[in-house]
Protein backbone atom coordinates (compact mmCIF):
# COMPACT_ATOMS: atom_id res chain seq x y z
CA UNK A 1 0.00 0.00 0.00
CA UNK A 2 1.33 3.45 -0.89
CA UNK A 3 2.02 5.72 2.08
CA UNK A 4 -0.52 8.36 3.03
CA UNK A 5 2.41 10.73 3.44
CA UNK A 6 4.75 12.47 1.05
CA UNK A 7 8.41 11.30 1.05
CA UNK A 8 9.79 14.04 3.35
CA UNK A 9 7.06 13.38 5.92
CA UNK A 10 7.60 9.61 5.69
CA UNK A 11 11.32 10.10 6.24
CA UNK A 12 10.72 12.31 9.28
CA UNK A 13 8.31 9.78 10.80
CA UNK A 14 10.85 7.05 10.22
CA UNK A 15 13.76 9.00 11.71
CA UNK A 16 11.78 9.87 14.87
CA UNK A 17 11.78 6.13 15.59
CA UNK A 18 15.37 6.54 16.84
CA UNK A 19 13.84 7.93 20.03
CA UNK A 20 13.26 5.25 22.68
CA UNK A 21 9.58 4.62 23.35
CA UNK A 22 8.41 6.18 20.08
CA UNK A 23 6.44 3.75 17.92
CA UNK A 24 5.00 4.32 14.45
CA UNK A 25 1.74 5.83 15.73
CA UNK A 26 3.34 8.32 18.07
CA UNK A 27 5.99 9.26 15.50
CA UNK A 28 3.18 10.06 13.08
CA UNK A 29 1.36 12.13 15.71
CA UNK A 30 4.56 14.01 16.53
CA UNK A 31 5.27 14.86 12.89
CA UNK A 32 1.77 16.14 12.20
CA UNK A 33 1.91 18.20 15.37
CA UNK A 34 5.30 19.73 14.55
CA UNK A 35 4.48 20.55 10.93
CA UNK A 36 1.04 21.95 11.75
CA UNK A 37 1.70 23.76 15.00
CA UNK A 38 5.34 24.09 15.95
CA UNK A 39 7.87 24.48 13.16
CA UNK A 40 9.93 26.81 15.35
CA UNK A 41 10.19 24.10 17.98
CA UNK A 42 11.16 21.57 15.31
CA UNK A 43 13.89 23.89 14.01
CA UNK A 44 15.20 24.40 17.53
CA UNK A 45 15.24 20.63 18.04
CA UNK A 46 17.22 20.11 14.82
CA UNK A 47 19.78 22.72 15.92
CA UNK A 48 20.09 21.27 19.44
CA UNK A 49 20.60 17.77 18.07
CA UNK A 50 23.41 18.94 15.79
CA UNK A 51 25.11 20.97 18.49
CA UNK A 52 24.95 18.11 21.00
CA UNK A 53 26.18 15.53 18.48
CA UNK A 54 29.13 17.75 17.56
CA UNK A 55 29.88 19.08 21.00
CA UNK A 56 29.14 16.46 23.65
CA UNK A 57 31.96 14.08 24.49
CA UNK A 58 33.30 12.54 27.71
CA UNK A 59 34.50 14.09 30.93
CA UNK A 60 38.27 13.50 31.03
CA UNK A 61 38.04 12.58 34.67
CA UNK A 62 34.83 10.59 35.26
CA UNK A 63 33.83 9.75 31.65
CA UNK A 64 30.25 11.02 31.92
CA UNK A 65 28.66 12.91 29.01
CA UNK A 66 29.61 16.59 28.77
CA UNK A 67 30.85 19.12 26.18
CA UNK A 68 33.32 20.48 28.74
CA UNK A 69 36.80 18.96 29.25
CA UNK A 70 35.83 18.17 32.85
CA UNK A 71 32.19 17.90 33.96
CA UNK A 72 30.44 20.12 36.50
CA UNK A 73 30.51 17.48 39.24
CA UNK A 74 34.22 16.68 38.84
CA UNK A 75 35.20 20.34 38.94
CA UNK A 76 32.88 21.28 41.80
CA UNK A 77 35.15 22.01 44.82
CA UNK A 78 32.28 21.42 47.24
CA UNK A 79 31.97 17.77 46.18
CA UNK A 80 33.90 15.30 48.33
CA UNK A 81 36.70 13.90 46.18
CA UNK A 82 37.57 11.26 48.76
CA UNK A 83 34.45 9.23 47.92
CA UNK A 84 34.08 7.80 44.42
CA UNK A 85 30.89 6.15 43.24
CA UNK A 86 31.37 3.74 40.33
CA UNK A 87 28.41 3.38 37.96
CA UNK A 88 27.82 1.79 34.58
CA UNK A 89 26.27 4.69 32.64
CA UNK A 90 25.73 8.47 32.64
CA UNK A 91 22.04 7.72 33.24
CA UNK A 92 23.04 6.14 36.57
CA UNK A 93 24.84 9.38 37.56
CA UNK A 94 21.68 11.30 36.73
CA UNK A 95 19.49 8.95 38.78
CA UNK A 96 21.74 9.22 41.84
CA UNK A 97 22.04 13.01 41.52
CA UNK A 98 18.29 13.38 41.18
CA UNK A 99 17.72 11.19 44.23
CA UNK A 100 19.88 13.72 46.10
CA UNK A 101 22.05 13.19 49.15
CA UNK A 102 25.24 11.87 47.59
CA UNK A 103 28.06 14.41 47.86
CA UNK A 104 31.04 12.51 46.48
CA UNK A 105 32.25 12.14 42.92
CA UNK A 106 31.71 9.52 40.19
CA UNK A 107 33.46 7.21 37.81
CA UNK A 108 31.43 6.03 34.80
CA UNK A 109 32.47 2.66 33.37
CA UNK A 110 30.42 3.08 30.18
CA UNK A 111 29.68 -0.61 30.31
CA UNK A 112 30.32 -3.66 32.45
CA UNK A 113 32.60 -6.66 32.31
CA UNK A 114 31.23 -9.32 30.01
CA UNK A 115 33.73 -11.94 28.90
CA UNK A 116 31.12 -13.55 26.62
CA UNK A 117 30.84 -10.29 24.68
CA UNK A 118 34.59 -9.74 24.78
CA UNK A 119 34.30 -6.78 27.16
CA UNK A 120 37.31 -6.76 29.47
CA UNK A 121 38.72 -4.34 32.07
CA UNK A 122 40.45 -2.23 29.38
CA UNK A 123 37.04 -1.55 27.73
CA UNK A 124 35.47 -0.07 30.85
CA UNK A 125 38.24 2.30 31.87
CA UNK A 126 39.67 0.24 34.75
CA UNK A 127 43.20 1.55 34.11
CA UNK A 128 41.96 5.13 34.38
CA UNK A 129 40.05 4.26 37.56
CA UNK A 130 43.05 2.52 39.11
CA UNK A 131 45.28 5.50 38.29
CA UNK A 132 42.87 7.75 40.18
CA UNK A 133 42.91 5.40 43.17
CA UNK A 134 46.74 5.29 43.09
CA UNK A 135 46.92 9.05 43.73
CA UNK A 136 45.67 8.33 47.25
CA UNK A 137 42.98 11.01 47.00
CA UNK A 138 40.14 8.47 47.19
CA UNK A 139 39.49 6.77 50.53
CA UNK A 140 36.24 4.97 49.67
CA UNK A 141 34.88 3.45 46.48
CA UNK A 142 31.12 2.86 46.40
CA UNK A 143 30.16 0.26 43.81
CA UNK A 144 26.79 1.07 42.23
CA UNK A 145 26.88 -1.22 39.22
CA UNK A 146 23.60 -2.96 38.48
CA UNK A 147 22.56 -6.13 40.34
CA UNK A 148 22.90 -8.24 37.20
CA UNK A 149 25.39 -11.05 36.66
CA UNK A 150 27.72 -8.70 34.74
CA UNK A 151 27.23 -5.85 37.20
CA UNK A 152 28.13 -8.13 40.13
CA UNK A 153 31.16 -9.50 38.29
CA UNK A 154 32.29 -5.95 37.57
CA UNK A 155 31.77 -4.90 41.20
CA UNK A 156 33.76 -7.90 42.44
CA UNK A 157 36.62 -7.22 40.03
CA UNK A 158 36.87 -3.54 40.98
CA UNK A 159 36.63 -4.31 44.69
CA UNK A 160 39.64 -6.65 44.45
CA UNK A 161 41.70 -4.03 42.60
CA UNK A 162 40.72 -1.26 45.03
CA UNK A 163 41.43 -3.36 48.12
CA UNK A 164 44.91 -4.13 46.73
CA UNK A 165 45.46 -0.37 46.75
CA UNK A 166 44.25 -0.05 50.34
CA UNK A 167 41.01 1.68 49.43
CA UNK A 168 37.82 0.94 51.38
CA UNK A 169 35.13 -0.58 49.16
CA UNK A 170 31.37 -0.75 49.65
CA UNK A 171 28.43 -1.93 47.55
CA UNK A 172 25.07 -0.17 47.51
CA UNK A 173 22.25 -2.19 49.06
CA UNK A 174 19.80 -4.11 46.89
CA UNK A 175 16.46 -5.45 48.03
CA UNK A 176 12.77 -4.64 48.20
CA UNK A 177 12.25 -0.98 47.18
CA UNK A 178 10.95 1.37 49.90
CA UNK A 179 7.19 1.57 49.53
CA UNK A 180 7.30 -1.52 47.34
CA UNK A 181 4.81 -4.21 48.14
CA UNK A 182 6.22 -7.71 48.37
CA UNK A 183 3.66 -9.20 46.04
CA UNK A 184 4.77 -6.88 43.23
CA UNK A 185 8.51 -7.40 43.67
CA UNK A 186 10.19 -9.76 41.19
CA UNK A 187 11.47 -13.11 42.40
CA UNK A 188 15.15 -12.31 41.92
CA UNK A 189 14.92 -9.19 44.05
CA UNK A 190 12.99 -11.05 46.73
CA UNK A 191 15.51 -13.90 46.82
CA UNK A 192 18.32 -11.34 47.12
CA UNK A 193 16.47 -9.54 49.91
CA UNK A 194 16.30 -12.81 51.88
CA UNK A 195 19.89 -13.85 51.32
CA UNK A 196 21.09 -10.34 52.25
CA UNK A 197 18.91 -10.14 55.39
CA UNK A 198 20.43 -8.43 58.41
CA UNK A 199 20.22 -9.49 62.05
CA UNK A 200 18.19 -7.09 64.23
CA UNK B 1 19.73 23.43 42.19
CA UNK B 2 22.32 23.32 39.42
CA UNK B 3 21.52 20.97 36.57
CA UNK B 4 23.12 17.53 36.47
CA UNK B 5 23.69 18.13 32.75
CA UNK B 6 26.01 20.31 30.76
CA UNK B 7 24.40 23.22 28.83
CA UNK B 8 24.21 21.49 25.43
CA UNK B 9 22.54 18.44 26.98
CA UNK B 10 20.13 20.63 28.95
CA UNK B 11 19.20 22.50 25.80
CA UNK B 12 18.58 19.25 23.89
CA UNK B 13 16.39 17.88 26.69
CA UNK B 14 14.45 21.12 26.71
CA UNK B 15 13.97 21.24 22.95
CA UNK B 16 12.70 17.62 22.84
CA UNK B 17 9.75 18.86 24.88
CA UNK B 18 8.29 20.27 21.64
CA UNK B 19 7.23 16.69 20.87
CA UNK B 20 3.71 15.92 22.08
CA UNK B 21 3.65 13.40 24.93
CA UNK B 22 7.31 13.93 25.86
CA UNK B 23 7.75 15.06 29.48
CA UNK B 24 10.98 15.96 31.28
CA UNK B 25 11.78 12.38 32.30
CA UNK B 26 11.31 10.87 28.88
CA UNK B 27 13.18 13.75 27.20
CA UNK B 28 16.10 13.02 29.52
CA UNK B 29 15.95 9.30 28.75
CA UNK B 30 15.85 10.04 25.00
CA UNK B 31 18.88 12.34 25.13
CA UNK B 32 21.03 9.91 27.12
CA UNK B 33 20.04 7.13 24.74
CA UNK B 34 20.84 9.16 21.60
CA UNK B 35 24.18 10.46 22.86
CA UNK B 36 25.29 7.09 24.22
CA UNK B 37 23.97 4.72 21.60
CA UNK B 38 22.66 6.37 18.47
CA UNK B 39 24.35 9.55 17.27
CA UNK B 40 23.80 8.50 13.66
CA UNK B 41 20.07 8.28 14.30
CA UNK B 42 20.14 11.68 15.99
CA UNK B 43 21.96 13.22 13.01
CA UNK B 44 19.44 11.68 10.63
CA UNK B 45 16.61 13.10 12.74
CA UNK B 46 18.16 16.58 12.66
CA UNK B 47 18.47 16.41 8.86
CA UNK B 48 14.90 15.11 8.39
CA UNK B 49 13.51 17.86 10.59
CA UNK B 50 15.29 20.55 8.58
CA UNK B 51 14.25 19.10 5.24
CA UNK B 52 10.62 18.73 6.30
CA UNK B 53 10.47 22.24 7.79
CA UNK B 54 11.89 23.74 4.59
CA UNK B 55 10.10 21.51 2.13
CA UNK B 56 6.65 20.58 3.42
CA UNK B 57 3.84 22.97 2.56
CA UNK B 58 0.21 22.56 1.51
CA UNK B 59 -1.39 20.65 -1.36
CA UNK B 60 -2.73 23.32 -3.75
CA UNK B 61 -5.90 21.36 -4.19
CA UNK B 62 -6.88 19.80 -0.82
CA UNK B 63 -4.58 21.75 1.56
CA UNK B 64 -3.12 18.70 3.30
CA UNK B 65 0.59 18.60 4.22
CA UNK B 66 2.94 17.71 1.35
CA UNK B 67 6.15 18.96 -0.26
CA UNK B 68 4.63 18.38 -3.70
CA UNK B 69 2.46 21.00 -5.45
CA UNK B 70 -0.44 18.53 -5.42
CA UNK B 71 -0.58 15.60 -2.98
CA UNK B 72 -0.58 11.92 -3.86
CA UNK B 73 -4.28 11.46 -3.19
CA UNK B 74 -5.36 14.48 -5.24
CA UNK B 75 -3.29 13.44 -8.25
CA UNK B 76 -4.21 9.75 -8.05
CA UNK B 77 -6.44 9.07 -11.09
CA UNK B 78 -7.90 5.96 -9.43
CA UNK B 79 -9.46 8.02 -6.62
CA UNK B 80 -13.06 9.08 -7.21
CA UNK B 81 -13.05 12.85 -7.69
CA UNK B 82 -16.87 13.02 -7.54
CA UNK B 83 -16.84 12.41 -3.76
CA UNK B 84 -15.15 14.97 -1.51
CA UNK B 85 -14.63 14.35 2.20
CA UNK B 86 -14.20 17.54 4.24
CA UNK B 87 -12.03 17.23 7.35
CA UNK B 88 -10.47 19.64 9.83
CA UNK B 89 -6.82 18.52 9.79
CA UNK B 90 -4.24 16.47 7.87
CA UNK B 91 -4.32 14.02 10.82
CA UNK B 92 -7.98 13.34 9.99
CA UNK B 93 -7.01 12.46 6.41
CA UNK B 94 -4.43 10.05 7.78
CA UNK B 95 -6.93 8.43 10.16
CA UNK B 96 -9.48 7.89 7.37
CA UNK B 97 -6.86 6.58 4.94
CA UNK B 98 -5.50 4.17 7.53
CA UNK B 99 -9.00 2.93 8.32
CA UNK B 100 -9.22 2.07 4.63
CA UNK B 101 -12.25 1.82 2.38
CA UNK B 102 -12.73 5.45 1.37
CA UNK B 103 -11.92 5.96 -2.30
CA UNK B 104 -12.86 9.62 -2.84
CA UNK B 105 -10.81 12.75 -2.35
CA UNK B 106 -10.42 15.25 0.50
CA UNK B 107 -10.61 18.89 1.40
CA UNK B 108 -8.74 19.93 4.56
CA UNK B 109 -10.12 23.00 6.31
CA UNK B 110 -7.06 23.45 8.55
CA UNK B 111 -9.40 24.56 11.31
CA UNK B 112 -13.09 25.01 12.03
CA UNK B 113 -15.48 27.93 12.24
CA UNK B 114 -15.20 29.65 15.61
CA UNK B 115 -16.69 33.15 15.74
CA UNK B 116 -15.49 33.58 19.34
CA UNK B 117 -11.91 33.11 18.18
CA UNK B 118 -12.47 35.25 15.08
CA UNK B 119 -12.21 32.25 12.73
CA UNK B 120 -14.57 32.78 9.81
CA UNK B 121 -15.20 31.00 6.47
CA UNK B 122 -12.28 32.82 4.79
CA UNK B 123 -9.88 31.32 7.37
CA UNK B 124 -10.79 27.73 6.60
CA UNK B 125 -10.63 27.85 2.81
CA UNK B 126 -14.38 27.91 2.14
CA UNK B 127 -13.89 30.01 -1.02
CA UNK B 128 -11.47 27.44 -2.38
CA UNK B 129 -13.89 24.63 -1.49
CA UNK B 130 -16.84 26.41 -3.09
CA UNK B 131 -14.82 27.02 -6.25
CA UNK B 132 -14.17 23.29 -6.47
CA UNK B 133 -17.85 22.55 -6.04
CA UNK B 134 -18.75 25.12 -8.71
CA UNK B 135 -16.83 23.16 -11.35
CA UNK B 136 -19.56 20.52 -11.12
CA UNK B 137 -16.98 17.72 -10.74
CA UNK B 138 -18.14 16.90 -7.20
CA UNK B 139 -21.50 15.20 -6.75
CA UNK B 140 -21.29 14.41 -3.01
CA UNK B 141 -19.66 16.16 -0.09
CA UNK B 142 -19.11 14.03 3.04
CA UNK B 143 -18.69 16.18 6.13
CA UNK B 144 -16.24 14.57 8.57
CA UNK B 145 -15.58 17.52 10.88
CA UNK B 146 -15.41 16.62 14.55
CA UNK B 147 -18.56 16.23 16.66
CA UNK B 148 -17.77 19.35 18.68
CA UNK B 149 -19.77 22.56 18.78
CA UNK B 150 -17.40 24.19 16.26
CA UNK B 151 -17.20 21.07 14.11
CA UNK B 152 -21.01 20.87 13.91
CA UNK B 153 -21.28 24.59 13.14
CA UNK B 154 -18.72 24.16 10.38
CA UNK B 155 -20.53 21.13 8.97
CA UNK B 156 -23.85 23.00 8.97
CA UNK B 157 -22.32 26.04 7.24
CA UNK B 158 -20.68 23.96 4.51
CA UNK B 159 -23.80 21.88 3.99
CA UNK B 160 -25.86 25.04 3.31
CA UNK B 161 -23.28 26.33 0.81
CA UNK B 162 -23.01 22.95 -0.93
CA UNK B 163 -26.78 22.46 -1.16
CA UNK B 164 -27.09 25.94 -2.76
CA UNK B 165 -24.80 24.60 -5.48
CA UNK B 166 -26.91 21.47 -5.95
CA UNK B 167 -24.35 19.13 -4.39
CA UNK B 168 -25.51 16.18 -2.26
CA UNK B 169 -24.27 16.49 1.34
CA UNK B 170 -23.85 13.82 4.03
CA UNK B 171 -22.43 13.73 7.54
CA UNK B 172 -20.45 10.79 8.94
CA UNK B 173 -22.21 8.90 11.74
CA UNK B 174 -21.30 9.51 15.38
CA UNK B 175 -22.17 7.24 18.29
CA UNK B 176 -20.86 4.39 20.38
CA UNK B 177 -17.64 3.03 18.78
CA UNK B 178 -17.76 -0.53 17.41
CA UNK B 179 -16.45 -2.81 20.13
CA UNK B 180 -16.87 0.01 22.64
CA UNK B 181 -18.56 -0.91 25.88
CA UNK B 182 -21.35 1.38 26.96
CA UNK B 183 -19.96 1.85 30.45
CA UNK B 184 -16.73 3.30 29.07
CA UNK B 185 -18.30 5.67 26.55
CA UNK B 186 -18.46 9.33 27.61
CA UNK B 187 -21.82 10.89 28.37
CA UNK B 188 -21.87 13.23 25.37
CA UNK B 189 -21.32 10.36 22.95
CA UNK B 190 -23.99 8.29 24.66
CA UNK B 191 -26.51 11.14 24.58
CA UNK B 192 -25.74 11.64 20.87
CA UNK B 193 -26.15 7.91 20.24
CA UNK B 194 -29.63 8.02 21.77
CA UNK B 195 -30.79 11.18 19.99
CA UNK B 196 -29.47 9.83 16.66
CA UNK B 197 -31.05 6.38 17.11
CA UNK B 198 -32.53 4.72 14.02
CA UNK B 199 -35.78 2.77 13.73
CA UNK B 200 -35.30 -0.94 13.03
ZN1 LIG C 1 33.39 14.27 35.42
ZN1 LIG D 1 -4.27 17.14 -2.08
Image (tube, coloured by chain):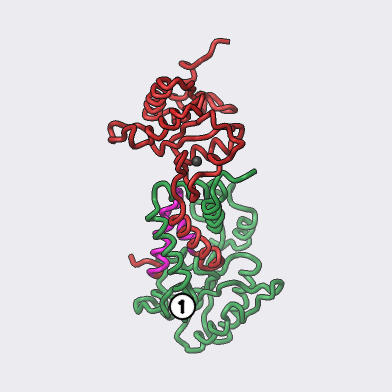
Chain colours: A red, B green
- Residue A80 percent location from the top left of the image: 58, 32
Q: Nearer the viewer, residue A108 or B187?
A: A108
User: Does A23 appear in magenta?
Assistant: yes
> At 61% from the left edge and 32% from the top edge, which residue is drawn?
A101
Coordinates of residue A140 in the picture (x, y in percent): 51, 24
Q: Residues within 10 Å of mark 1 (few under 14, many from 20)?
A: many
Outermost front residue: A135
Residue range corresponding to the magenta coloring: A7-31
A49 or B82, nearer to the observer:
A49
Of residue B191 and residue B30, the one placed in the foreground of this image is: B30
Report helix, strand or loop for mark 1.
loop
The chain letter for the residue carrying disc 1 is B
x, y (%) of residue B135? 48, 89
Can you say whether A104 is above or below A162 in the image?
Answer: below
Toward the bottom, the furthest residue is B135
Is residue B119 toward the left or the right of residue B178 in the image?
right
Q: Is mark 1 within 8 Å of ligand 2?
A: yes
Q: Quick check: is B52 in the magenta stretch?
A: no
Q: Based on the displayed image, in which of its 4 quarters is residue B158 positioned?
A: bottom right
Secondary structure mainly formed by the magenta segment: helix
**Residue A115 position (above or below residue B53):** above
Q: Residue shown at 56%/54% (left/top)?
A: B14
Label 1 sits on residue: B59
Amino acid sequence: MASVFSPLIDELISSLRCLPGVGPKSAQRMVLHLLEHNRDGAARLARSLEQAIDGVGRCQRCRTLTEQPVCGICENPRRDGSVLCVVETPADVVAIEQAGGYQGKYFVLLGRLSPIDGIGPEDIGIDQLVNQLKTGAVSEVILATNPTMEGETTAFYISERAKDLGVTVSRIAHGVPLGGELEFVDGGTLAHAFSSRKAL
